[in-house]
């Protein structure tokens, strides 16, 4: 276990669940086992939680190592309040299907926006053609 200066308050309650929001939008929930000065994390008994509307599903991932550059948010989960959420847990297959449908709807909406802009003589550069620097 790594104990780094300034992380003592985060590590003192090591057996509590933590939520990690990654740069790519994924949400991980697991027990924090290690953290270093670069915010590299090791999570144990990790699940990837997928939200679609008022439903969610958890995909078991096991031990998960996250490089600090990918961490957007790290926070402790209050297990007592977590059970009071109005979300409905569904099976992995059902949440993945709903996620696929939601992504298709977003793509169709984006196509309509691009078409409307094109008809007005405007263009929006695609995200994959933009330079990240």
Image: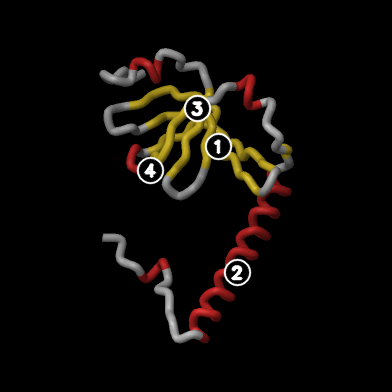
Question: Looking at the figure, which quarter contains the C terminus?
Answer: bottom left
Residue 58: quadrant of the picture: top right
Disc 3 + disc 1, Cβ < 8 Å = no
**On residue 70, which mark appears?**
4
Q: Earlier in the sequence, mark 2 or mark 3?
A: 3
Residue 78 vs residue 20: left or right?
A: right
Residue 41 in the image: above or below residue 59: above
**On residue 18, which mark appears?**
3
For label 2, the residue is 109
Q: Position of residue 69 (x, y in %)?
A: 33, 42
**Counting other residues with Cα less than 10 Å from the Cα at mark 4, is it few (<14), some (14-19), or many (20 or more)?**
some
Q: Nearer the viewer, residue 106 or 92?
A: 106
Distance (Cα) linking label 2 and label 3? 34 Å
Task: Give the secondary structure at mark 3.
Answer: strand
Disc 4 + disc 2, Cβ < 8 Å = no
Q: Position of residue 7 (x, y in %)?
A: 33, 20
Distance (Cα) linking label 1 and label 2? 32 Å
For label 1, the residue is 61
**Counting other residues with Cα less than 10 Å from the Cα at mark 1, is it few (<14), some (14-19), or many (20 or more)?**
some
């Amino acid at each position: 276990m790594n104990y780094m200066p300034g992380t003592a308050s985060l590590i003192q309650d090591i057996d509590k669940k933590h939520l990690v929001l990654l740069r790519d939008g994924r949400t991980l929930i697991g027990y924090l086992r290690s953290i270093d000065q670069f915010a590299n994390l090791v999570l144990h008994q990790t699940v990837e939680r997928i939200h679609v509307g008022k439903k969610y599903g958890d995909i078991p991932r096991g031990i998960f190592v996250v490089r600090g550059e990918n961490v957007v948010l790290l926070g402790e989960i209050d297990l007592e309040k977590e059970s009071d959420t109005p979300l409905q847990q569904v099976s992995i297959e059902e949440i993945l299907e709903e996620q696929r449908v939601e992504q298709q709807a977003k793509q169709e909406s984006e196509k309509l926006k691009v078409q409307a802009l094109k008809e007005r003589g405007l263009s929006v550069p695609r995200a994959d053609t933009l330079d990240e620097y």
